[in-house]
Amino acid sequence: MAYNILIVDDSPAMRRVVKRVVDLSGVDTGKYLEAGNGIEALVVLRSEWVDLIMTDINMPEMDGEELLLQVRADAMLASIPVLVVSTDKSEARIKQMMESGADGYVSKPFMPADLSEQMHRLLGGGGTPDEGF
Amino acid sequence: MKASDFASLLPDHCSEVLDAMYFTTVLESTIDPNDASDDPCGPDRPLPNVDDFAFQLRFTGDVSGRFGLCLGASTARGLAANFLGEEESDISPTEVAEVIGELANMLCGAVMSVVPSKHKFVLSHPEPVLGMPHSRAHDLLLATLATDSGDIHTWVTVEGNA
């Protein structure tokens, strides 16, 4: 089964790096979808099937926390796993995002294997973790 | 909290980011909490070279201020190539700027994540700047990270404590 993955980050460079990690992760990927903030992400989510959302927190217009809350409040989107990828590694932030409904949290800088492991966990298979690392 | 309090945090946490995501090793770090006059980016002066890259962002929380960095074009291209996993020749100046902006974001985030705080820090988005804060006008810490990709000049100003 090929999974559609939505990468939400206001940094195009970071989206490229995350995409590269996904490429190397062994996850069978269908579509790569990208958004620069939460508003753009919601537009994508309402027009495309998405199996996993990987989102930054600190973004303009709508940040990752608001995106997470809106996804969880929308019956059509609520079941999509959300993996937070953020520079903020403080315990308070991680706890807050997990309590808001995040399914996983990876802090930047990240090791590619850590991101890959979280993806495999949330997708429940779809390849061998750490393939390519 | 004073800018000088960041002296014990900045080198180690910047080094972690550079090592993990930019495949760059910090060889030596130099801290100067008092005087910006010798900094090549110069207080309230234009950057020494027109093709230098300098970005700054604001942090707001229990302590508020600014974090910034400045580095030469060659160093910036090398870091961008490492970060993106591509050849320097394949990376446009716009892409280099995006990578260095993200570097500023990650360095600031890494440092602020370990600052004791009752509240979450909010970071603004990295913006290009043409100079750096003046040591006479700000509580300022300067740190130069000598890396195997070249020097990275960083600064932190503290402008308020909650």
Image (cartoon, rainbow, N blue to C red):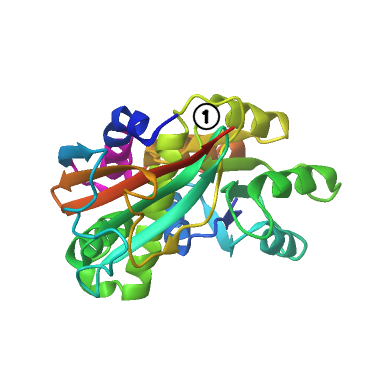
**Amino acid identity at mark 1:** Ser
Q: In the visual, does B117 lie left or right of A47?
A: left
Q: Nearer the viewer, residue B146 or B88?
A: B146
Query: Badge 1: how crowded within 10 Å, few (<14), some, or many (20+)?
Result: some
Q: Residue at x 47, y 63 (%)?
A: A12
User: Is the magenta region chiefly helix, strand or loop?
Assistant: helix
At which x and y percent is residue B111? 40, 36
Report if residue B22 lies within the magenta region.
yes
The percent position of residue A119, horizontal first and vertical second, equals 53, 40
Q: Chain of mark 1?
A: A
Q: Which residue is mark 1?
A: A90
Pick the front one: B131 or A116: B131
Identity of the residue drawn at 48% across and 60% down: A11
Mark 1 element type: loop
The residue stretch that appears in magenta: B13-25
Q: Is residue A55 visible?
A: yes
